[in-house]
Image (tube, helix red, strand yellow):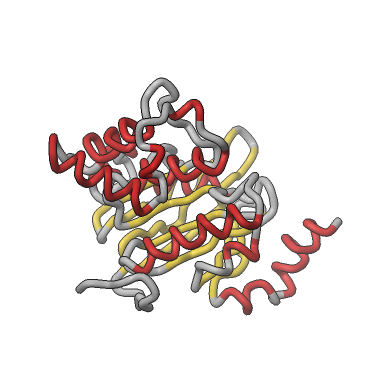
Amino acid sequence: MTVFPGDTVFPGDTVLDGEHLHKRYGRLHVLDDVGFTAADGEAIGIVGPNGAGKTTLLNVLAGSVTPDSGTVRLDGADVTRSGPQIRCRRGVGRAHQIPRPFGGMTVLENVLVGATYGAGLRHREAHRHSIEVLRRCELLDLANRRADTLGLLHRKRLEMARAVATRPRVLLLDEIGAGLTDAEAAELVATIRELNAGGVTVVWIEHIVHVLLQVVNRLICMDAGRVIADGEPSAVLSDAVVVDAYLGKARS
């Protein structure tokens, strides 16, 4: 099925899920019996106060952190003990809150790394794919710039482009809008919406809620390592437990 920007993608089969996920660091219970599901075509936002366990959940889903107990499945197959390289090859892409490009390489070379080692492409195919990713992420005119000369917005775009270059079915975003102006965040929103409209499942942690709501059709709120609400965004944000745990703390 071909999907064009602006089309509505209806969620399909479950592509990534976690069940009874627990993770401790010493006495701190960072994930406490967390369940998670993401279907093909969904756009899911994750919110909650600092220390709620949001990034740890993304790390567990991406494979960079192994849960103490529980199960992570990708297309129904158990990948709990599989590392990020294996999950990346199977369709899980990840963009971090703090961009980590290869500073001495050009923008194009950074994206080629994702295309080659993430998507498994070679030579001309990898180059063609990387050029298309740069176009979609509005970085094509900076293809030959060294990554360490980029400003924050373009570093954020490059972080996302490197993840997109791996051809993800699920794209995990960790506060990709942090530090941006409203205008810059709006530019990122347009790109993320286009990716989601093209069929990529998006799971996005973000503290800038009004930005998040421009993309997601489902919202999860976490607090103290637990999921305290999961559903339609307006219903979650009006839930008294969420207001007390998250919005109330944010105003204090």
Snapshot quadrant of residue 226: bottom right
Snapshot quadrant of residue 207: bottom right
Q: How many callouts does the rendering have?
A: 0
**Is residue 244 found left or right of 32 in the rendered image?**
right
**Is residue 184 found left or right of 109 in the rendered image?**
right
**Is residue 214 found left or right of 194 in the rendered image?**
right
Q: Position of residue 190 (x, y in %)?
A: 48, 62
Q: Nearer the viewer, residue 83 or 197?
A: 197
Quarter occupied by the C terminus: bottom right
Residue 214 versus residue 106 in the image, above or below: below
Most extreme residue toward the right is: 252
Most extreme residue toward the front is: 141
Quarter occupied by the N terminus: bottom left
Residue 250 versus residue 122 in the image, above or below: below
Give the residue at x 22% y 46%. Answer: 129
Give the residue at x 28% y 72%. Answer: 3
Give the residue at x 41% y 50%. Answer: 138
Residue 65 versus residue 234 in the image, above or below: above
Snapshot quadrant of residue 198: bottom left
Most extreme residue toward the top is: 104
Q: Position of residue 210 (x, y in %)?
A: 64, 65
Give the residue at x 39% y 64%. Answer: 194
Q: Position of residue 236 (x, y in %)?
A: 63, 73
Q: Position of residue 126 (x, y in %)?
A: 19, 40
**Is residue 26 found left or right of 105 in the rendered image?**
right
